[in-house]
Image (tube, rainbow, N blue to C red):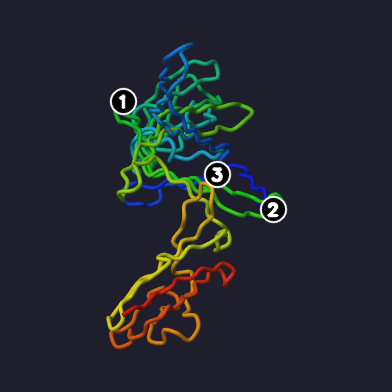
Amino acid sequence: MSNEFLVSVADVILRDPTTGNAIAYGRANISSAITLSMQSADVRAGINNSLLYSYYHTREMSVKIEEAVFNETLFALNAGTDVVVGAANVLQTDCLVLSASGSGTVTLTPVGDVSVILPSGAVETVTPSTLDITTSGGANARVYAIYVTSKSVDQITIEATTPPDIVDLTLIAEIRASDQTTVSKYLQINIPQFQVAGNYTLNLAANGVSNQALEGKALVSTSSDCTTGDYYAKVSYIPVTSSTEYSSIAAIPATINWTASSAESTQISVLGIRGGVYANTNITTSCCFVRSGSSGSGITVGLNTGLVSTSASSTTIDEQIRIDVGYASGSLSDYVVINVST
């Protein structure tokens, strides 16, 4: 088996946990980290207080992603609110060179008075006439006009009590072979219920750009079947090639017993076996099924389904029939024996 390595950072997909619709797709990430932790309680007794048992509990799964680009989505998720699009009052600053009479024209229509910062640092408040302003002490001066105006904006309101959002979070990373150029698999980690932590830091620096972080914890999701327990996430290793390598296959049942002169039908299932920590996989639909030899001519075999059957008039034989099972062009094989008795 060749060595494989998980490389670089993961892409991030955020979706609505109810509808499945995409919210954001992050491909400019600086770092992405997943931490799986548990607490334990030790049971000790006897001479020297030996450790008899450790009970592990309080499993947590946390995620932190740092993104190089700046957008509204992560801010809104941490605030637990939507980005509202529409007209809103915002602050506007204009640099103006006033006339000899101390007059000038601002860029946008002010809502209320205009504050004018004079070269001396003094602030003069004036009432505009539509876009025009006139100061008493700003003749021929370069000034800054500060005022409120109405513009169409994307706006996020950070409320005091609103909790951060819960999203469906998926991380996708590359697993490369030892030659460093071949992507052999994609690692996909899906957290159906990801609770955003609500921790958001916006650092601005004169000699750099701001990074954004998304962090939080996985909430438990209810299993849809009776064999899998409730879970935090599902981790998938998706091969680039469509085939999966198995060490062997097993056809079930190994022996079928039918009664002559009776209509019979049995479904053969095939398991792909990889061994180790890998669970067996049902690969029935990827196999081919062929009756071996000339015996059992009245038996119908589904070439790609594994369903074997016979009518009442065809099961008058008292013999043993073999069904050969093949996978991956016959490189892996097994067989099933049908015993027809009177």
- Identify the residue at horizontal 58%, vertical 38% (top origin): 30
Q: Is residue 83 visible?
A: no
Q: Position of residue 108 (x, y in %)?
A: 42, 38
User: Label 1, label 2: how many angstroms apart (C-alpha)?
Assistant: 49 Å
Nearer the observer: mark 3 or 2; the answer is 2
Residue at 49%, 60% in the rendered image: 272
Q: Give residue 121's position: percent from left, percent from top.
A: 52, 16
Q: CA distance from mark 1 to mark 3?
A: 32 Å
* Residue for badge 1: 160
Under circle 1, the secondary element is loop
CA distance separating discs 3 and 2: 17 Å
- The kind of residue tagged 1 is Ala
Amino acid found under the numbered disc labelled 2: Thr
Helix, strand or loop at label 2? It is loop
Tell me which numbered mark, 1 or 2, is placed earlier along the sequence.
1
Marker disc for residue 181: 2
Give SS at disc 3: strand
Quadrant of residue 308 in the image? bottom left
In terms of depth relative to the viewer, which is nearer, 214 or 57? 57
